[in-house]
């Protein structure tokens, strides 16, 4: 008994010994020599951010393919499309040099111009009218225009004509959320630098200028456009099936990222667990009945482009895919999977080895009425009628990762990833893929809510969020009902239209029954608050 108490992994192995020796080997290898953080380190710290159309993204696709091949998988990169203009972000820096010297936290949108080397100039508050702009034209040459309120580029042509160094706008918080418009042409590249600055620093500069203090800034941003077409790729690696090689279980995540940081939790974490799941299965000599396919899609941040292109180009293959398992929710550990009524007993068997693998990281099969799409690459497959799943993720109270702090922000770097969660998640993904690949039959396809379906009656409402098991928002779709209502990642949903929300099914039901305008109660920073959500239908 003492031996078992001091060797929990031995206890786990003994309990699972009679069920599946391959699972035993995955657990043993995953505990003794888990390399998930090595993959993440190389991806984020050696290669760096992976914006769709960037040189780094192509490098990352080629590197991951090479790693898959090294482990014995049949790997390839497959072109899914092109962008007319590529974009590489170089180093950037900014500081105030008068009235005091102070480093500034800034960034620019992707696919936007930087500076031609360091540019030093005075700062002026943006003109309030066209007439004022004309009056200030001469002194605006080479100056940084500090914009308050919206409309940073409202006077784009006039600012360019005045020869301003660029415009600077506030993010309204201490986070810089990177985004950008990829729909640009080589013949009409944007020319006006638009700088995003954290709220506190922007506010200080505005205050100084209003007080009549002269402010001088030096900003150096190296952004480079590349003439296209820029080829874009998905990475595909197969562990061939022994009995049904033309049937598949897909494990994956998106390899592209925004480039305001190094793309660690979005989605280096999902890439690295996918890679480690593949390595673990290859290392233990797993020979699944069905082919386990590992996929890393690109173009996800611009609208699931890579996965949608793959699905559209391989319609017949969709009938042969038993399941798609997508990790794209940050570094919190994989804590569960949604399952329709017919899937619950199947998944309870498949995931039995990981349900109590670690008492601090339990796994739960969560019964749902139907599978819903959300905002990641599994949605592309759901739209084609494939059982596709977005893992539930959680973190213990003391180690919960607040995804909104890193998601698309300047903080999304390697140190944000939690090693113990990543290692655990890689094991869960490997065991889950193995179990589904060895079922007698493909997963049943009832209860799918396919993207693009046209159900009879009013269209189904979407709030536009993903939540963890505690109803804490992990992602918000831009311009969705949730986004327009002012909901934020990290908010915990408590009530909608007066109904208590304890789990996702409660929320889904409340959304469909709520009036077009409904009150939602959330907890933010320990305080309850009420917001108004407006649905379009």
Image (cartoon, grey):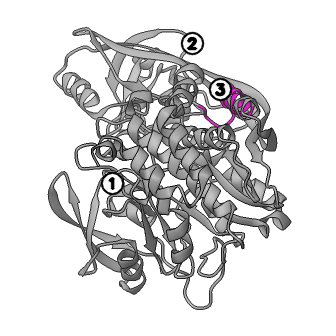
Q: Name the one closer to the observer, 28 or 247.
A: 28
Per the model, the C-alpha gap separating discs 2 and 1 is 36 Å
391 w.r.t. 187: above or below: below
Determine the residue located farthest toward the bottom in the rendered image: 457
Left or right: 79 in relation to 499 = right
Residue 286: which disc?
none
Going 57% across and 24% down the picture, which residue do you hit? 42
Q: In the image, residue 51 lies at what x, y percent?
A: 61, 34
Label 1 sits on residue: 488
Is 63 part of what is drawn in magenta? yes
Dot 1 or dot 3: first in sequence order is 3
Q: In the image, residue 477 lies at what x, y percent?
A: 48, 57
Left or right: 432 in relation to 239 = left
Q: How crowded is mark 2: few (under 14 residues within 10 Å), some or many (20 or more)?
A: few
Asked which quadrant contains residue 104, the reply is: top left
- Secondary structure beneath label 2: loop
Please identify, in this view, whether the residue under mark 1 or under mark 3 is nearer the observer.
3
Q: Do the residues labelled 1 and 3 touch (CB within 8 Å)?
A: no
Label 3 sits on residue: 56
Q: How crowded is mark 1: few (under 14 residues within 10 Å), some or many (20 or more)?
A: some
Q: In the image, residue 92 lies at what x, y percent?
A: 48, 17
Is 233 part of what is drawn in magenta? no
Q: Name the one closer to the observer, 78 or 52.
A: 78
Going 85% across and 67% down the picture, which residue do you hit? 316
Q: Which segment did they paint magenta?
A: 50-65
- Secondary structure beneath label 1: loop
Label 2 sits on residue: 116
Dot 2 or dot 1: first in sequence order is 2
């Amino acid at each position: 008994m003492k031996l078992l108490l001091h060797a929990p992994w031995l206890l786990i192995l003994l309990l699972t010994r009679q069920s599946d020796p391959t699972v035993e080997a995955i657990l043993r290898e995953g505990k003794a020599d888990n390399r998930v953080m090595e993959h993440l380190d190389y991806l984020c710290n050696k290669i760096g951010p992976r914006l769709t159309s960037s040189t780094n993204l192509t490098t990352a696709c080629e590197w991951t393919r090479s790693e898959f091949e090294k482990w014995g998988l049949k790997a390839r990169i497959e072109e899914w499309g092109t962008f007319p203009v590529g974009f590489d972000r170089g180093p950037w820096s900014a500081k105030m040099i008068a009235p005091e010297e102070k480093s500034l936290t800034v960034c620019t949108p992707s696919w936007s111009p930087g500076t031609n080397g360091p540019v030093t100039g005075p700062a002026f508050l943006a003109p309030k009218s066209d007439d004022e702009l004309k009056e200030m034209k001469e002194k605006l040459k080479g100056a940084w225009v500090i914009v308050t309120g919206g409309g940073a580029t409202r006077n784009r042509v006039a600012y360019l004509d005045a020869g301003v160094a660029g415009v600077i706008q506030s993010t309204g918080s201490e986070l810089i959320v990177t985004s950008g418009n990829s729909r640009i042409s080589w013949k009409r590249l944007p020319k006006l630098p638009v700088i995003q600055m954290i709220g506190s620093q922007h506010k200080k500069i505005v205050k100084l200028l209003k007080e009549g203090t002269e402010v001088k800034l030096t900003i150096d941003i190296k952004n480079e456009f590349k003439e296209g077409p820029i080829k874009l790729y998905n990475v595909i690696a197969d562990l061939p099936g022994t009995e049904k090689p033309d049937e598949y279980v897909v494990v994956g995540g998106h390899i592209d990222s925004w480039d305001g940081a190094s793309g660690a939790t979005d989605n280096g974490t999902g890439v690295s667990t996918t890679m480690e799941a593949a390595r673990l299965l290859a290392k233990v000599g797993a020979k699944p009945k069905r082919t386990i396919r590992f996929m890393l899609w690109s173009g996800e941040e611009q609208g699931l482009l890579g996965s949608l292109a793959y699905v559209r180009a391989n319609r017949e293959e969709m009938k042969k895919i038993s399941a798609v398992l997508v990790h794209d929710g940050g570094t919190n550990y994989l804590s569960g999977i949604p399952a329709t009524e017919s899937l619950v007993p199947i998944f309870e068997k498949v995931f039995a080895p990981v349900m109590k693998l670690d008492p601090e990281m339990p796994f739960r099969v969560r019964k749902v009425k139907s599978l819903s799409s959300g905002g990641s690459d599994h949605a592309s497959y759901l739209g084609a009628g494939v059982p596709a799943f977005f893992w539930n993720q959680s973190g213990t109270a003391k180690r919960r990762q607040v995804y909104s702090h890193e998601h698309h922000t300047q903080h999304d770097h390697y140190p944000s990833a939690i090693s113990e969660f990543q290692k655990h998640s890689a094991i869960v993904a490997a065991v889950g893929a193995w179990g589904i690949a060895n079922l007698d039959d493909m997963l049943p396809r009832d209860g799918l809510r396919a993207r693009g379906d046209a159900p009879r009656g009013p269209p189904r409402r979407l709030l536009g969020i993903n939540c963890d098991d505690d109803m804490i928002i992990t992602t918000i779709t831009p311009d969705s009902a949730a986004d327009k209502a002012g909901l934020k990642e990290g908010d915990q949903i408590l009530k909608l239209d007066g109904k208590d929300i304890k789990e996702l099914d409660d929320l889904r039901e409340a959304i469909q029954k709520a009036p077009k305008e409904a009150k939602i109660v959330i907890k933010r920073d320990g305080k309850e608050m009420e917001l108004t959500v407006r649905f379009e239908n």
